[in-house]
Every structure is written in structure tokens, then in C-alpha cells.
Image (cartoon, grey):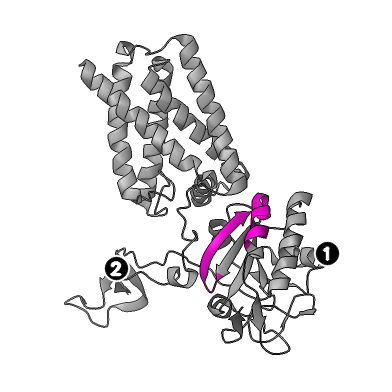
Amino acid sequence: MKWLIAFVRALVGILFIFSGLVKANDPLGLSYKMQEFFEVWNFHWLDHFTLGFSILMIVFEIVAGISVLLGWRMRLFSWLLLLLTIFFTFLTGYAYLSGKVRECGCFGDCIPLTAGMTFVKDIVLTVVIIFLFIVRDQIRPVMGQTGSVGVLAAAVLLSFGFQWYVLVHLPVVDCLPYKVGNNIPEKMKIPPGAIPDSTVITMVYEKNGKKVEFSASQFPADFDDSYHFQSRYDKLVRKGNAEPAIKDFDLLTGAGVDTTEAVLTARGFKLFLFRKEAADDGAAWLKNFNIVLTMAKAKHVPLIVITGDYDNVEPWVEKQGIAADVTVLKCDATAIKTAARANPTLYLLKGGTILQKWSYADLGKAINAIGSLSEQIVSGPAQSDPGGTASQDSAGSTHAHQLQSPGDTTHK
């Protein structure tokens, strides 16, 4: 019996620590997943608290896992783990049975699990934790009180510290589709071998005051004029996986012109500055950003500000006096959340391939990287903009954009 208890303790403890560490690498990812659940339940007022919930939950997972391994306060932690696991099982069961949430974020974006896989995992984990709950009085601490408290205190500090680091400097391990080395246009395509959704045309008729549904290929044997057509729709038979890794990455001018293809297919280096919204700006990152912009101009590297808050970011650009030096484009806010875990985040691309990325706190490193680029020479007296013509913003002013067209760029 002792070996079984020891095995279960090790399994549960390591699983919770591993799960917490994976999510600690990207606490914003868990925060966005919480928002997804809250939106399904119409709990929108909780959206502003999800990051705090995420950070605390991750710390608790790590601390709980270590406590199980140490055998410290098992009466308390067995109750907490049991309640937490039952709650998770409810969430994943709801996601799986309702079909409204496809992935539950159990191991973040690094190890994506379907709602069904996560539900099964949580059922098994609940059974295992019930076993630990039953035998909790047989578990003895492996360390004294002082040693256990010291280990747990260090775990709490390291958990909070690591999450603070990745929130400021971007995730240490990038598991998102916008990671360095990925080509954005390629990731916007449906992957080879993907299975599309399987649907069947379903007809809705009324007969004798009752609605009757049947497929377009299986009409009732007694079908006649007593059936009155109501509507038709496509009924999902089997959910496929024919979805691109990058979705909704559409770049629009202030006038609504789609420039996505022109921007991503333009050859040569380019910089993307992702701004979720025009938040209060710190002097430190703005100072480095101005140096980045100056060096980019000297190298003829276009800088494009991509935002989901165009109406506020465009005036910010005007206020900074850089309207003639950058292009401001609109993009879906959800796509920006995935592309930029920090606000703002700077990308260096060549063509559509991401070469490097930095958070606002690391723009000093971007200065060195941009300074080492070869100078781009643009033929002709003027450079073309993303749409091939100068675009007009909502205020009516026209900016000359710096993005080279695909055939205009050469390198020294």
C-alpha cells in the first residue's frame, strides 16, 4: 500500500507542478482562456480580473504539487486539490459537452489538448485525488516544518517572479504560431492533410402543425403537398481540423482597404509594432523606440504600427510627431492578443518570416539588431505604400508610407 501511495503522490505532485510551470510561461494565455469561458457565460464583468486569477491559479498549482510531494499539510491540500479538480472537471465537461470551447488551456499553448481529451484527463485525475484524499492521514511529511515552509515560500516567490518576467519580456518558450522562424502567410494557410468539416444539408418542413427535419437526400416516403417548406441549413456531422494556425490576421488601412497581402509579400526587412491599445506610455520604451525608428529610416526599413485601437493609436502617432515615418493599420484585437503578449511588441521580419521579436522592455536589444541590418535601397523617387497608393486616415490626412512593393527592394 505504501508504494501505491508514494506512486500516486509523485504522479499528482509532478503533474500539478508541470501544469503550473507550462502555464506560468504564458499567464496571459490562461487569462484569455478564462475570458473565453466568461464570455460564454455572459460574465463579461470578470474580464478585467482574469490575469490576476490566472497568476494566482498558476502559483497555487505549483505550490499544491510541491506540497503533495513533501507530504505537508495533506489534510488541507487534499481538500483543496479535490475541490479544484472537481471544478476543473466541471469546466472541461461543460466545454466538451457544449462544444462552445474547443480547447481548455490545461497545459497552455505548448501542449494543446482538445476539450474531450482534457475532460477524460480530469476524470482520471479526480479519481486519483479521491484516493489521495482517502489515505491522506497515512501520508507523513518528508521534511520538518521549517524546511517545508522554506521550500514552499521559495516556490511562491519564484512562481510570481517568473510570471512577472514573462509578462514584461514575452514567454521564454514561444509556442504560439507567431514564434520566431515562422512565416506568417504560410501559417495563414490550411495545413496539408487537414480534414474539413463534414456537413449535410438539412431541410425543415411543416406538416400538420409540426416541424419535420430531414436531409436533402432522404426525403420522407410520404412527401407530398402536405409538407410546407420552412427553411434549410447545413448540419454539422463531424468537426474537422481544417483551420489555419493564424486566423483573422487582416491588415486594413484607416479607410478599410485590405493591405494584408501587399504587406506580407513585400520583400526585404520590415518592422511591425503591435499596440493593443494606446495605454499610458513609459519614457524608457519610447526613448528606445525613437532610436529604433531613426535607425529604421536610415536603413530604409518600413515600420508599421498594427493595432486594434486605431481611433486612439492614430492620434498617438500624430502626437508623437512620427505620422510621416510610420504606417498605422487596423487588425483584429484577438489576433493581436496572440501575436503580442506584451503591449507594445516589436517584430523584425524579412518578407513574411519573423526573424526576431521584442517586448517594450527589450527594445534596447532591437536597436543592436536593426543596426546590424544591411541597408535597403529603394529604386525610384518615392516608396510605395501597402495598397500601392497613399492611404488616407480617418482624420483626412494623407501619409506617405514606407513599405516597399515586392519588386522595389535590393540590398547592399
Q: Determine whether, in the image, residue 352 is placed left or right of residue 9.
A: right
Q: Residue furthest left?
A: 221
Q: Residue furthest bottom?
A: 380
- Is 361 covered by the magenta stretch? yes
**Residue for point 43% across, 64% down:** 245
From the viewer's perspective, tell me whether residue 95 is left or right of residue 313.
left
On screen, residue 145 versus residue 375, left or right, reads left
Residue at 35 percent of width and 68 percent of height: 242
Q: Which residues are magenta?
A: 350-369
Q: Residue furthest front?
A: 412
Q: Is residue 389 within the magenta segment? A: no
**15 above or below 368?**
above
Q: Which quadrant holds residue 31?
A: top right
Query: In the picture, which quadrant includes the C terminus?
Result: bottom right
The residue located at (51%, 17%) in the rendering is 150
Q: Which residue is mark 2?
A: 195
Q: Secondary structure at mark 2?
A: loop
Mark closer to the chain start, 1 or 2:
2
Picture quarter with the N terminus: top left
**Callout 2 crowding tier (Cα within 10 Å): few <14, some 14–19, many ≥20:** some
Q: Quadrant of residue 270?
A: bottom right
Where residue 47 appears, as percent x and y from the top left, is 59, 46
Tag 1 residue = 319
Q: Amino acid at mark 1?
A: Lys
Give the residue drawn at x 59%, y 65%: 348
